[in-house]
Amino acid sequence: MIQSFSGDTLHAKETIAYFSMEIGISHNIPTYSGGLGILAGDLMKSFADMKLPVVGVTLLSEEGFFSQKIDEEGNQKEFSVKWNPHDFMVQLPNTVTVSISGREVKVTAWKHMIRGVSGFNTPVFFLDTNIEGNSPYDRTLTTHLYGGDREYRLCQEIVLGIGGVRMLESLGYNISKYHMNEGHAALLIVELLKKTYHDGLTEQKCYDLESVKGKCIFTTHTPVAAGHDRFDVELFRRVTNNYVPDYLLKEALHDNMINMTSFALNHSKYINGVAKRHGEISKEMFPGYTIEYVTNGIHPPSWISPSMKILFDKYIPGWLSDPYSLRYALAIPKEDIMAAHMEAKKVIIDEVNSRTGLGFHPGRFTLGYARRFTEYKRPDLVLFNIEWLKAIAERVGDIQIIFAGKSHSQDTKGKDLMKKIIQSAKSLNSQDCKIRIAFLENYDMSLAKKLVSGCDAWLNTPQRPFEASGTSGMKAALNGVPQISTLDGWWLEGHIENITGWSIGPHPQDPGFQYDNSMDDEAADLYTKLEKVIIPTYYGESDRWCEIMKHCIAINASFFNTYRMAEQYVSNAYME
Ligand SMILES: *Cc1c(COP(=O)(O)O)cnc(C)c1O
């Protein structure tokens, strides 16, 4: 429905649909779990800023992703989040139905408008099955994000993929491209193929495969096999009521499971990973497909601290609608950068002190680590040898570390790591030493913004090659905060030693490189750099530190943003 676009656009007659199981727009709309959803929200915001004719489709996730509390022993407790869709969106009169295990399930939608920097509105549709006429079970299908069993997940994917296509049709959109953010929405392909049905000699010839493929774009997000959605064949047939043509099912069969990634790969003209290295890894994982990459980004207006924003507005007017101009951050005077950072730092230090009473001090070197707690991300690497870390602080100066992050409710290893860190922190905080460690509960978009802008350096220690991209380090860079990270995901592109931050462990281009991911060696490398380079520069050479801060902004924030991503999707995939 072109009327819903408030601005004139080049291609107003045709619309791009962006499908994602989660879209994270604001901490007030808790329908996201982490990186995947926040990336989707950031990208949608840039589409709005750029006045592109794109609409988003996702699920309402009425109880949100959980809110986190930590008990005395360091165990995570999960609580559902109460939020009221009426505060942020309007319920539409349109209803469509999808068939689930033979039942007709009604799907309705809520419309939230993302307002771009120049006032252009981009709609996101949140699908909802909690309506009268649906069975009690079906009413819960859009309640929990990543909750329930395999059957529940498959039902959600029917609502998202098939229900989403039907809803857009009911709203009058003429969709030219369907962009699937991860495989959860891949059933939309089946729906599109069904629409092309005509009599043909073979089952395959009944469908216009080429025209559907020409409309589909697929972004894969993880090199972790468990991250790819799969369903038992019997379950799949039963729940979809044999809606999916047999030959399609056969194509998507891997190890006797229906693989949603295969669906998406087989029927998308443009396929991409989320960083250069991740594109390469995806090619190895899925041989025979042409796989490109569009490195992730962040939406700068959403992640800039208030104090840094004032500075950018003053020295780089127009940067909000043109983040490439952040290139000019090199010319901002040192005193202004340092003062703006100190203001942002006081915000997070106050937050730590009011929540924990640990007496953090804004004059001390502060390291931040916040992300989903899961084994491959190795949140415990920086605490690998606590005696060594204490000795470093004695020799070169105080160290404060702030941790935050949730673990998925079934991720017992992630939860164990969280507990281990919280217990180490407790023990250290009770000692007379120069290290203080805080763990802040309930990592969400609002806490993330304070953390990435208020810490002095941002730490990331994933086991390679499992970090597809990572984006929190990009948010830090925007705020002039350098990253210290293993060379994986986006950091392979954004890292320049001593200029935008520091690496941990060997470089993939080193002779004889292999992924050994030794905790021993990598912790030693991290400790050595902290002691010899990073902390001495922070405390002793403020001119150099400030140059590093400016280079984070000029080199990384000007590139690793969703504005550039949106342009790449437009020129490489949407305009095809
Ligand atoms: C940015 C963000 C993420 C993703 O960042 P990673 O670096 O990929 O971990 C996850 N959760 C929240 C709340 C964020 O703001």
Image (spheres, rainbow, N blue to C red):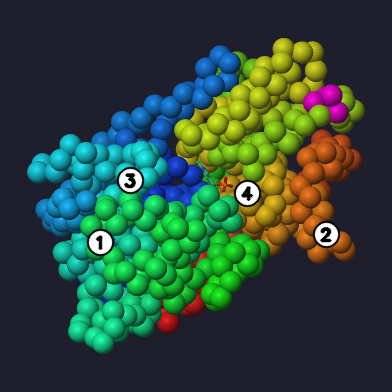
Q: Nearer the viewer, residue 432 or 518?
A: 518
Q: Is residue 269 left or right of residue 72?
A: left
**Sequence order check, earlier mark of 1 and 3:** 3
Q: Is residue 188 above or below residue 409?
A: below
Q: Amino acid at mark 1?
A: Asn
Q: Nearer the viewer, residue 550 or 399?
A: 399
Question: What is the number of callouts on the image?
Answer: 4
**Residue 457 in view:** yes
Q: CA distance from mark 1 to mark 4?
A: 45 Å
Disc 3 packing (10 Å; few <14; some 14–19; many ≥20): some
Q: Is residue 407 above or below residue 60?
A: above
Q: Nearer the viewer, residue 169 or 305?
A: 169
Label 2: which residue? 513
Which of the labelled discs sits on residue 151, or is there none? 3
Label 1: which residue? 242
Where is residue 349 drawn, in percent x and y?
A: 61, 27
- Mark 4 and 2 residues: CB-CB less than 8 Å, in contact? no
Disc 1 packing (10 Å; few <14; some 14–19; many ≥20): few
The magenta segment: 386-390
The CB of the residue at mark 4 lies under 8 Å from ligand 1: yes
Circle 3 sits in a helix, a strand or a loop, which is it? helix
- Mark 2 and 1 residues: CB-CB less than 8 Å, in contact? no
**Sequence order check, earlier mark of 1 and 4:** 1
Q: Give the residue at the far left of this rendering.
A: 133
